[in-house]
Image: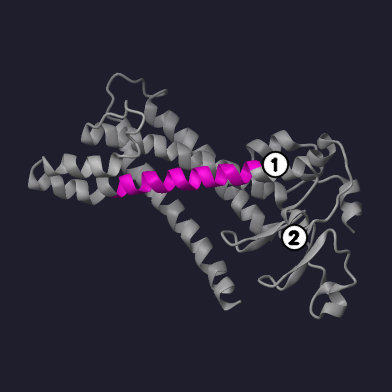
Amino acid sequence: MLALRLLNVVAPAYFLCISLVTFVLQLFLFLPSMREDPTATPLFSPAVLHGALFLFLSANALGNYVLVIQNSPDDLGTCQGASSQRSQCPPPSTHFCRVCSRVTLRHDHHCFFTGNCIGRRNMRNFILFCLYTSLACLYSMVAGVAYISAVLSISFAHPLAFLTLLPTSISHGKRQSAERLGAVLGSDMFVILMLYLWFAVGLACAGFCCHQLLLILRGQTRYQVRKGVAVRARPWRKNLQEVFGKRWLLGLLVPMFNVGTESSKQQDK
């Protein structure tokens, strides 16, 4: 339990550090390199378009991250503590989390990167957080590949060029002068390592987002699947509306609190 509580503190700090490093690289490396194009118009220059898109993705990722924490699942005070008290809660839609020390409605899982349980109230914000984190990481990877390709004159035409980027950049630097090799082993090498990290995090978040969407279409949570709890068959549109609400398009573009239907709220009580 001590290890889980420690992970509950380390994982959010790790995510915030990665976010800060990404912002620094975008601001001081990628954007300045795009301003060097003399043929681009000031309004539609690559730097402006890249900055606007990255800001949109990052704002949605961090905004939904904050909402996941603020919009915590319901804390059922009568269900906390002893097992005799927890037995009063309806088992199909509630679960006692030992890390959070509380029982939440329609519990899905505990997310260590947010340090919070994912349940009925913040499920939509969590899915959008995974979606925009994946898009921001993959887009940062593309921008980083363009930067490395321009700085080190490395071609990515070969399908396996990205997988062999690290050894190729080291061998490329050894053929350069000692000063250039130091630069490769400095900021450029750090960017290359971040490319692999962005790629891994982007794929992981995308896969997790797709998995959660499939469970929502079936009207299930990860906790119900793990425990083998049977759920009532309903149309997939109602399952989506229960999580994303009626104003789903607005929530897709702007971070906002979850807007569930009244029937779904009454169903979980």
In magenta, the rendered stretch is 190-210
Three-letter amino acid code at disc 1?
A: Leu
Magenta-drawn stretch contains 51: no
Quarter holding residue 110: bottom right
Q: Is residue 149 left or right of residue 21?
A: left
Reading the image, the residue beneath label 1 is: 213
- Residue situated in front as seen by the camera: 238 or 172: 172
- Residue situated in front as seen by the camera: 9 or 223: 223
Image coords of residue 190 (percent x, y): 30, 50
Q: Residue furthest front?
A: 228
Q: Is residue 108 left or right of residue 39?
A: right
Callout 2: 10 Å neighbours few (<14), some, many (20+)?
many
Please tell me whether residue 11 is drawn above or below residue 139 in the rendered image. below
Q: Is residue 125 left or right of residue 150?
A: right
Marker disc for residue 73: 2
Q: Which residue occupies 31% across, 42% down? A: 29
SS at mark 1 in the image:
helix
By what rule are the colours in the image chosen?
one colour
Q: Residue furthest left?
A: 177
